[in-house]
Image: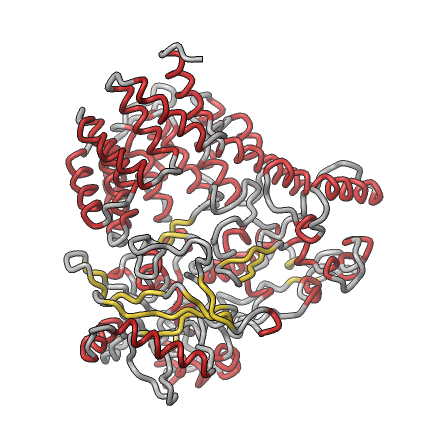
Amino acid sequence: MKAFLSRQPSNAAWRRWLLSCLLLLAGGMAAAQAGELLAASASPKPAARELAVLSYSGSSRCAACHQAQGDGWRQSHHAQSMQRVEDVDGSVHELPIAYTFGVHPLQQYLVALPGGRLQALGWAWDARRREEGGQRWYPLYPDNPPPPGDPAHWRGRDQNWNFMCAACHSTGVRKNYDAHQDRYRTTWAALNVACESCHGPGSRHVAWAEGKPRGKALANFGLVAETLRRTPFTFTAPDQAIARPAAGDAPALSRSKTATEACLGCHSRRQELLSDHEKDGSEVAKPYLDRYLPSLVESGLYHADGQVDGEVFEGVSFLQSAMARAGVSCRHCHDSHSLKLRATGNALCAQCHLPQRYDAVAHHRHTVGSEGGQCINCHMPSKTFMGVHVRRDHSLRIPDPTLSRTLGSPDACTACHRDKPADWAAQALARWREEAGVGGALHAGEAAVTASATAINAAWLGSPEAERLNAALAAAVSGVGKASLLSLLPRDDSPRGAALLHQAARDADGWVRLGVARALAAQSPALAWTVGSELLGDSLRAVRIEAARSLAGLGPPTSSTDTGWTPGAALRQRWQAASEELVAVETASIERPEAQVNLATFYRRQGRLAEAEQGLMHTLRQVPTFVPALVNLADVYRQQGRDQQAEPLLRQAVNLAPKGAEPAEALGLLLIRQGRREEALPWLQKAADLAPGNPRYAYILAAARKALAKP
């Protein structure tokens, strides 16, 4: 849904298709009703405000002074991120199909529905050139079109623009969801991704430009150009292979981090942490982890080695790279206004990588200028999303066919040489190493990736091993990598385990502290509370709320005889404040059943079962087929000794999710608690079959078989 946004194809076929859709979708909707729906979504004209209040000025005002940047921006995907649909005569009208959503390589269309909702249709326009297979309509779900009621159906919650897309595709968005009326009154300062989307409201800057003394600072302008300036990388010696920032230029590296985080808010898989009333535009200057809760390296989103698997929007992949650690920001490769690459082909990488060394047969072992000799084809393997959108992994890693063969992650070598197995590629790379005189030794970064991927893969399969994860942590170099490893740590009561968590909780990198916050849920209550006592008061909201989430199920804090730590009033205050923040964050997304289940789980883990039950029942009234709510409500009933009421919920869950191991296991365990072991066995067997790599299901099945004396 976060595709780059566009203008519609201007051809007769498109106009005929649009008119037919209008006739079908408008139905009995009167013109006055359609106008009312869109008026609720459109941004009102800004009222006059005092200079002391930040307000948006509009990109045309920015471009009046910053002409070069404005000219570049007008041609960008950001400028075309949302547009009104033209009628057949070229004029602009309010229509049931209200907006073009996308520019290249695909374009979608938004339909206005009751409740202020804008929904994306399930058909898209392929905007690529005809010789590339484009200039056609195509279904986004060609094999299994989602039926009505499915979240991915065009009327479903996953195709809702107000929640899923608006914050990143328009400027100054307030979704304004009314839970009581189940209605949006979404507003925006600019329909597209405009100047102030990245820099923040410019009213004070404009006032300064129009009359304030020129020597005065640009007061209260969110992110000024100097803040986002590219760190200069230079070659200081003729034989230097890779350019570096000036020695000891810490401010430059800090600027690079800020510049990357300016993009990361939209170019990452994350949950927004700020509610509408907390947004005044100045939040663009806040750290990323104070505004967003990101996904780490998690199954289904990434491969165990950190390569992209699901739709994660590149940003967190880049943070794993050696480039990001060296101070490279998005702006070093992409112009921030036109969004064009700063150079074409290998010349882009040659800004920092000496071409005589790297754009040579001795390095890439392919003909110079060939597809195999292109840096991106080896170091940025691609994956296609939404049918036609080819996106490249930005972790910029060294290809490792051996690891790919072991874990099933993508291999850049066999992606091109499709007629060759991974063994062939691994042997070729080993031979090249020998010829280069490095033997079988792995580069330090490769060794770290191998250790991390092996540990993460084992944890995903249900065998988190503290020693293996600790060893991988010692070698890990990126904050994202460390956080992902920490989040998977099993319970470890050893002095070494405690020392590791305490040290990581004080790490300067907020990502590392976030990983610790997620690790607390698996630790002993005494260790979790002593470590968590610091994280509950962390400077970053993402860390605070994840610490609160993890600690919720561990009971009240108690003294630790090992450390001499005793909880006090300050800890209770931090716990209360972080808990309130967590509830506020989930409440800000309350239209989503996932947020409602998150809240109910938070309450359930604290023993607040009545509140959890109430919330889950409300969720199921809204979305009766939401399986996580069914399973969680059944678990609430289990805690209350109400298994008879839980069984129908789990029966419904296994019917709705026939390929889900968790509801099958939950039903099997319920039947065992009721003494119905023969009935339980097929469900436990099904859970084990559906998740063959997870030893938990296999262990429970084996225990049940033993109790029944089954072979």
306 vs 541, left or right, is: right
Above/below status of 694 relative to 585: above
Q: Is residue 479 visible?
A: no
Q: Horizontal placement of 488 versus 679: left or right?
A: right
Residue appearing at x 38%, y 20% in the figure = 562
Q: Residue at x 21, y 45 (%)?
A: 620
269 is higher (above) or lower (below) than 161: above
Foreground of the two, 666 or 276: 666
- Residue 521 in the image: above or below residue 15: above
Q: Quadrant of the N terminus?
A: bottom left
Of residues 673 and 560, the one nearer the viewer is 673
Answer yes or no: is residue 546 visible: yes
Q: Residue at x 24, y 61 (%)?
A: 277
Residue 420 position within the rendered picture, expressed as x and y whole percent measured from the top left: 72, 46
The residue positioned farthest toward the bottom in the image shown? 89
State the residue in front, 546 or 697. Answer: 697
Q: Quadrant of residue 86?
A: bottom left
Task: Please determine whether, in this image, residue 538 is positioned above or below residue 151.
Answer: above
Q: Quadrant of residue 468?
A: top right
Residue at 44% in and 77% down? 8
Quadrant in which the C terminus is drawn: top left
Count of residue discs: 0
Q: Position of residue 53 (x, y in %)?
A: 27, 72
